Image (cartoon, rainbow, N blue to C red):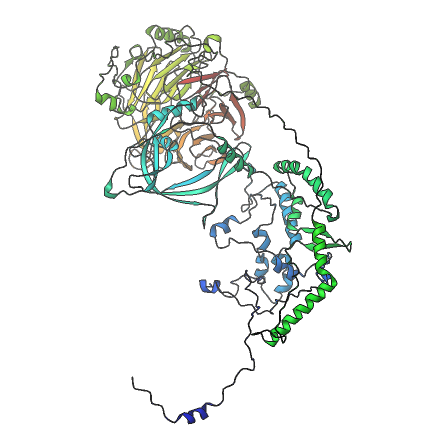
Amino acid sequence: MPPTIQSGSREDRDRKRGGEKRSDLVARVKYNNTLPDIPFDPKFITYPFESNRFIEYKATSLERAYKYELLTEHDLGVTIDLINPDTYQIDPNAYPDPEDERLLEEDHSSHSDSKRSRHHNMNVSWLRKTEYISTEYNRFTQKTGDSERRVGFKIKQIMKDEDVYKDRESQIAAIEKTFKGAKEPITKHYSKPGVKPLDILPIFPDFDLWKHPFAQVIFDSDPAPKGRFAPNAMEEMSQAMIRGAVDESGEQFVAYFLPNDETLGKRKRDAEENVDYVPDEEYQYMLSREYNWNVKNKLSRGYEETYFFVFRDDGVYYNELETRVRLSKRRKAGGAEVPKSRLVVKHRDLNTKEIQAQDTRLMMLEPPQEEEEEEEQFGSEAEGSVKSGGSKRSRKEDATKPKKLEPKDYRKRLIPRTTKILDVKTEEKISVKEENISEIPAPLAVHAGENGIDNGVSSYEQLRLKNLQDNADFFAKLGITEMKTDIKQSLKPSKTTQLKSKPVKKEKTKAPPETRRASLRIAKMDPDGAPLPEDFFKQPFEPVEEHFKVWRHGIKKKILPLEKTKESKEEKINYFDRPRKPSGTLEMAEYLGFNSSDSEHDDLLSKMKGCFKCKIEKSTEDKTSFDSYVKNLSKLKINMEKWQRKFGFRIYTKQSILILDIHPTNSKLLTAAGDKWGFLGIWDTAGREFQTDGVVVYAPHSRPINCLKFSLHKPNQLYSCSYDGTVRCCDLQKGVFEEIYSTPDEVLLKSFDFMTADTLLVAQQDGCIALVDTRTSRSTAENLYQLHQKSLRSVSVHPVQDNIFCTSSTDTTVCIWDLRKLKEKGKSQSLDELSHDKSINSAYFSPVTGKYILSTSLDDRIRIFNSENLSSCNKEHSIVHDNHTGRWLTGFRANWHPTREDLFTVGSMSRPRQIDVYGVNGRKVLAMKDEEYLGSVCSLTVLGRNQDVMVGANSSGKLHVFK
């Protein structure tokens, strides 16, 4: 860089520069009395039109965070008068200008930046919402949609003030309008004029479950255990536990535990005995997975509140999910496996702190308390203080009691409160807004130098200090300081010496301790309280572990116990591992199960001969009126004689009953049931001389029996199908089990129905329907049709048109088929397809004319379809019903009355335990209860064809008879 060269002398440069201008101020200002910045953002007038009316503009983050500079006077336009206090007197009849009132309103945080909040903020006609305080939706929302459609030069005349802003009175009117609107009936859909509501349910907080805090747990993948049967896996996950843990390196994680088989059995026992848990019982859980976690709650930024609803008979109840937990699978270094950790759980009662926490949560649902405005006369403050002290306790007690408030009571919450103060000297009432007003400053002392000017202080500053000193002297002459002191002294409450009486302590009467319900089974006592014999709990049949691996081959043999080897103990028992019974015809006497004897078998067949002569018409209709039949049905009870009361029910098997049927005869009550291990029980209710109370058990199958039906054309025949892939006919007249149809081992049979007296339609797990002719000697199907890609659940033949049938499947559909149009190869076309939200348990035609189809689905719905037009079935009713029975209970299947189309029954999860009876209009007409004998869930129900009787079966092998 070249050097800088200066040209000319210093004098020349000084002449060119000219003289410098100096300030006339001799001394710099020492004090800067500028006010601090305003602590809040300025309030802008609301723009009454859409922000993107003329142009769509998106502000950047810098523009949104820009702090506007305010150009104001040094005192912000506020003057303080220290002499005349009347300056601050407010006229109670004066109202601010609407523009000023609009600016003085407090800002409320709006959720307009959240798409979800905007969606939830919409008002719809089918959801009535009452408001106690004005919300941001109806308070600050600019309702200019109608005006904006008529954009023109007269838009300002068209718009109204209430369209832009709602004042206080408009808010109050809007609140009261919501209470009036909530009482108006809803007659139409909010967007579809032709749709009318069937049920109108109120929405309330869940007062029963609100005391329990709920959390939403979101897994990154399905936590179901691999290689387990789907229903079993769902039951295990419903009993799972999540617990925080620390590994050896000190790293924290979330452990996911699943119950073992022993714990699942204990929980099933607790559910059947209607107890939450058994005291001092250990429940063991095994570690299944390890997760990393991310927790958010109400205090977290960006947390959206989530609620879930519970549907009950009297309304809809909501609960909040106050915590959201996201779990992601934990990756361990080196691909290490999850350690085999065990968690042992014991249940205890809630302690005092936990009960108080639940009570605190319930207080959230109490209605808000009205704040009382206190008006105190300062002249009689001493007397008022004594009175208020005496009623302090009573007011505290009253505050804890919930008080029901009407909408008009909330008017005060929108009006600013005022405090009335009585001036001591002037005796005038002054109404002042409840604000913090700074006190009058005390007189200032100013010290000057010898010549009246302090060293280092300018003349301007001396003049200012002198004025302050003069003002202070003037206030002293007026006696304002003494007046201020007198007022403070007069406002202090005078101390009165009164003897305080000690309150008499009331003795609290301790409530008698509640007696805990104890299990009579654990106490080894019968229902009457008498001790049971020592051999009562001894199994009269072979142990389960020994029975699984032994089966009979054609002749009756004594079952020998298994060898106690290490392999037999560790091997997992599964009914799918059990081989089939021998093919062909089986003698009933050689396949007796449990403690049934040959004499009981012979006695049952001899008593059944009178039932074989009757012949029942399939389409016989009951002519009794609906109301009369329901009235007769309500009179049915579980009547137990003394010799029967040790059970309160009939024990069929030791396992879950999967299917149930009643013999169509009217001469006696004969029922049949099949369980999950292939046992078939036949019960003659009049057989009290039997050791098993009339129950004779057979073992025609080796796997679960899914369908069981007495033939209406041949009353001596009882047909059954099983997971072992066979359909057998129990001929009670010949005493044999005939094999009608057989499939390979991997094909499971799910259901069947009669087309004619000699032909069956069999539903298979592979989605096929088999047409079987019982008159042929071979055990194969005449035709096989592939109708669904997934497993079938049920098949039902039309009662009038034998070629029409419907199927239900796990693919969430019910399909109607015409047998004449089916193709043995290729895809067949259904007449109609009825979609559901989840898998379907069953679907049946109505038994007389086939006018309706009744379906039961896992989406907690029972649906009734009108099937008069088979190519276009319409859904007439959808009934909300809890169909989630879990792993251990048999799934619900709504079942028609055998000779009526206006009534059906279904099991129920409600307490006390009951069986629900519905009409074809979708209304619940009856609940069959018996608190003395019915204490478990009856998953299966069936009504008598020619008798006024109802039978329910639970998942513990027991039947309950209402007659």
Residue 70 location, quadrant? bottom right
Instruction: State whether residue 460 appears in this view.
Output: yes
The residue at 70%/51% (across/down) is: 489
Coordinates of residue 941 in the picture (x, y in percent):
45, 22
* Left or right: where 883 falls relative to 450: left
Between 310 and 417, which is closer to the camera in this rendering?
417
Q: Is residue 186 above or below residue 900?
A: below
Coordinates of residue 274 in the picture (x, y in percent):
46, 23
Coordinates of residue 683 in the picture (x, y in percent):
40, 13
Residue 205 location, quadrant? top right
Residue 762 location, quadrant? top left
- Looking at the rendering, in which quadrant would you find the N terminus? bottom left
* Left or right: where 30 falls relative to 603: right
Instruction: State whether residue 60 appears in this view.
Output: no
Coordinates of residue 131 in the picture (x, y in percent):
60, 45
Between 684 and 92, which is closer to the camera in this rendering?
92
